[in-house]
Amino acid sequence: MSGTASPGGTAMPGGTASPGGTAMPGGTAMPGGTLYLVPVPVGDGDPCLELAPRVIAIIRGMSDFIVENDRSARRFLSRVLDQQALDAAHFYKLDEHTQAQELPALLEPLLAGRDAGIISEAGSPCVADPGTALVEAAWNAGIRVVPLPGPSAVLMAVMAAGLGGQRFSFNGYLPPEPAGREAALRELEARSARDGSTQLFIETPYRNDAMASSAAKVLRAETLFCAAIGLSSADEQVIRMQASCWRAAPPRIGKIPTVFLLLALPMAGPAHNRADAPRGNTSRRRRGA
């Protein structure tokens, strides 16, 4: 980078950022607040126990929140803010229906010098989440963007599945119709077989069992398929089996938030029996087990 940043700022090429600001190319920092990406527990945990004290302090220092769902955001904040602060908070909606021309209005509190936070439905914002568009708009407007540390169902699923965290790819939502979903599963399996990567994806909860059924139908018998169900909740369960086992005795997942993973062994060659390849055991792990 040819620009330099002083403490708290972020420099863009050719610019110099002052504290708390973001420099645009060839210019000085624009005034404004900071856009914080606020994590939310992925299960039913208490935010004050699951989130770092620094994150809680930052949330309590804001009164402007850009949210995917007003009701769930208020429920989350009611466990962090006192009633007076919650009553004084301002909420701005950002969901999959938000149009590009509506984004500048969401930045108005920040351009006025106030900090604001993006709150997702669960987990960390801007991963398979409409917040990405606003973050891009904030960068273009010279607004400082700060991700806060917190839970991520995607990373938790990688950790729990044991399929390999050295190389993995998150693919978001697959096509909802059966033919498109099955074609996507075959492509992810082929990609995994080529490069040894773990492939992750998610589904709208009411289609979880349809997703598992499609995977059992089209994946190769020895491909490992995993469902990380209800992470950090009382319903938490991680099921990891070969596709052939899913076909023989398909578990019911139900409408519980789930992250799906698969790992395919190479089609042929000496790497097929490599010592570090995950074994095709059938296993389940429930919370507390």
Image (spheres, helix red, strand yellow):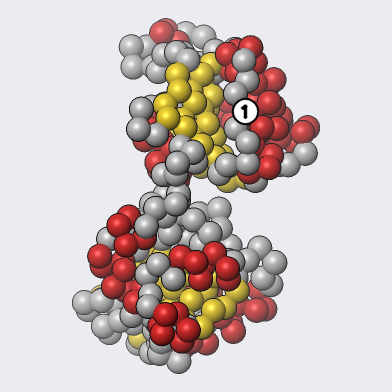
Q: Amino acid at mark 1?
A: Arg
Q: Is residue 199 visible?
A: no
Residue 5 picture location, percent across and down: 26, 76
Q: Which residue sits furthest bottom?
A: 112
Q: Nearer the viewer, residue 2 or 69?
A: 69
**Left or right: 258 with respect to 286?**
right
- The residue at the point 46 percent across, 37 percent down is 236
Give the residue at mark 1.
252
Name which residue lies at 21% across and 77% down: 7
Expressed as whole percent of the image width and height from the top left, the position of residue 144 reads 38, 76
Identified at 34% across, 77% down, the residue is 60
Does residue 192 lie above or below 177 as drawn? above
- Give coordinates of residue 41: x percent, y percent: 42, 55
Taking the image as shown, residue 178 lies to the left or right of residue 170, namely right
The answer to which image quadrant residue 256 occupies is top right
Q: Secondary structure at mark 1?
A: loop
In this rendering, the answer to whether 248 lies above or below 31 is above
| Image quarter of the N terminus | bottom left
Where is residue 56, by image quadrant?
Answer: bottom left
Task: Pick the quarter of the image with the C terminus.
Answer: top left
- Give the answer, above or below, for where 66 lies relative to 261: below
- Decide: few, some or many residues near mark 1? Use Cα within 10 Å; few <14, some 14-19, many ≥20: few
Q: Is residue 246 in sight in this rendering?
A: yes
The residue furthest left is 7
Relative to 66, say whether 190 is above or below: above
- Count numbered badges in the picture: 1
Q: Which residue shows up at 54% across the image and 79% down it?
A: 91
